[in-house]
Structures are given as structure tokens and as C-alpha cells.
Image: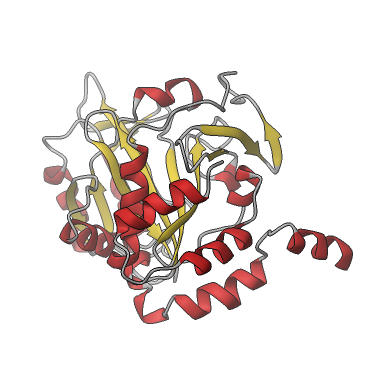
Amino acid sequence: MFDAARKLHEAGVLGLNERNSDFIMRLNPRRLYPRVDDKALTKELALAAGMAVPDLYGIIGNQGEVRTFTWIVENHESFVIKPAQGSGGDGILVITGRGERKRDNFRLSSGVLVSKDEVLYHLSNIVGGQYSLSGNPDKALIEYCVQFDPVFAEVSYQGVPDIRVVVYRGYPAMAMVRLPTRASDGKANLHQGAVGAGIDMGTGVTLAGVLDNEIVEEHPDTGALVAGLGIPQWDFILESSARGFEVTGLGYLGVDMVIDRDRGPLILEMNARPGLIIQLAKRAGLADRIARIEAIYDDAATPEQRASVCRHEFKL
């Protein structure tokens, strides 16, 4: 066991204990956690910094406001409901349309129709804290439903792919795209069965994927090749991720973005505790990249300069 751990360390693979003690505890003050744990606050801060986010249609902050759902969405055919303090995609409801005969019925991304009462019940559960990180009462966000870029059409199943960039002290260190599958119920969550594909930092082109800790070449549902996809507006995505450092103040950060077919890259959320499976998707260790960032670190560098450096330093 110790020999295996030593080999991983020598290969530059960052372990969980090292991540927690050396980076999260040292670089992420707990007083700043609300900036990323509360999605409503994250959206507000990102907008203030001039970053693009999905439009917010409304917020339901308590049980008494649940009934306001009807007028919040009256002019919207599609939308997303999510807990402000949720994690792992739990509690997210994606509405893609309404019933043809009864507009009080809503169609989920899976194609299933649900009634307004079922949606109200779900909203009540969110507000009650069923999906919040702490278990405390929460808020429900109702926002624009992203229409993903056509580049992902053959490698996604009933959901929107997202891009995770791990940022160290403002420098984008590693990136992957998470592709929804049937097993993940259309969610871009690797722990629930989505495919993670590493991204070449220099070119923005995807590499082979990982599914349940195994390397895969094809999407399990569509059969399309995972590698070789060119991520649109890659330079802008890296620059936006780098800017997440200024927005949150967190030195070890995960920035999640989506690419809308009409609106381009949008900040979806940020994370103070980004996971480590990205190393498997990239087949590279974070520890080596973090060491390189420390060697080239420039406190005066702009987000654009930091992104440019990482494109050159971390090709593949």
C-alpha cells in the first residue's frame, strides 16, 4: 500500500489529504466559502465582475414564496430549478417545455411530464433544506435553461455538458469536460456515471475520457468518439476561469462553465473543494502543475496573462 502511494506521489498525483491540508485549508479561508457555496451570491459576484452567467428568472426564499413560481415562469417555456446551496447536481430540475394540452404540466429533460403540484412540492423541499450542504433552509433559484453548443451533440445524453477548470492561485492548472450519460440521468456528474474527458490546455481539444475510473474512447450511449472535440472559445474560457480567483478570493478553486449555442461560455458555479478525479481524466498529476505554477507565479499578472502562461506551460 505504501509503495503504491509513493509511486503515485512520484508521478505528481495529488492525494486527498494533501489537497485538504496544503491547499484547501491554507488557501481557502472559510469566511469566503459563502461566495461559492451560495449559488445566488456566486452569480451576483460574477455579474459584478462582468462575467456572463445564465439569466436568473427568480428566487424563492421561503415556503410562503413557493406559490410565486407560477408567475416567475409564466413567460418561459424552459428553465432550471436548483438549490442555492446544493452540490453534486442533487435537487436540480431541468424543464425543457410544457404540456401541449395543459400548460400547468412541465416536461423534464428525460421527456417525462410532471404536474405543477409536483414542481411546487420539489420547490418546498429545496427551501426546506433537503438538498443544502448544511441541511439548513435554502433558497431555490429559477434560471435560464442552457442550450448546449452543437459541438457536444454526439457526446451528450439528455443533459448539458460542463467544463471544469481547476485554478491554483489564479492560474488554470487543469481542465476537463463532463459529458452526461444515461447512467448519470443526464447530469454532468462523474460520481453518478458521466464521462470526464481531459482537455489539452494548449489547444482546447478533448482527450480520451474516463468512466467509472476506466479509460474510454467512446461515449457509452451514442458511440461517438470522446477525443478530438475542439472546445469553442477556449481562450475565453481559460481567462474567465482565471478571473474566478479575483471574484472569490479562493486560492484553490474549481470553476464550472457551460457553452450555450447562442450566448457562448457562461459561468455555472464555482467550488471551494474541487475533486481529484480530473487527474485521471487528464492522465496527469496536479501536484506537478501546482509546483510549476509556484515557480512562475507573478502576483501582478492579469487573468489574461495567467491564462496565456498556462496555455503554453500545460500543453496536453
Which color scheme does this rendered protein use? secondary structure
Q: Which of these two is toward me, 6 or 95?
A: 6
Q: Does any portion of residue 16 appear in the rendered image?
A: yes
The residue lying at 38 percent from left, 52 percent from top is: 307
Q: Look at the image and tell me in which quarter the C terminus lies.
A: top right
Q: Does any portion of residue 268 appear in the rendered image?
A: no
Q: Does 243 appear above or below 120?
A: below
- Find residue 61 and report its horizontal and vertical position in percent: 22, 63
- Find residue 299 and report its horizontal and vertical position in percent: 36, 72
Q: Look at the image and tell me in which quarter the N terminus lies.
A: bottom right
Q: Which of these two is toward me, 157 or 47?
A: 47
Q: Quadrant of residue 138?
A: bottom left
Q: Quadrant of residue 258?
A: top left
Give the number of marks.
Answer: 0
The residue lying at 53 percent from left, 48 percent from top is: 314
- Find residue 142 and report its horizontal and vertical position in percent: 24, 48
- Find residue 70 and report its horizontal and vertical position in percent: 16, 43
Q: Does 288 appear above or below 150?
A: below
The residue lying at 48 percent from left, 41 percent from top is: 188
Q: Which of these two is toward me, 303 or 186?
A: 303
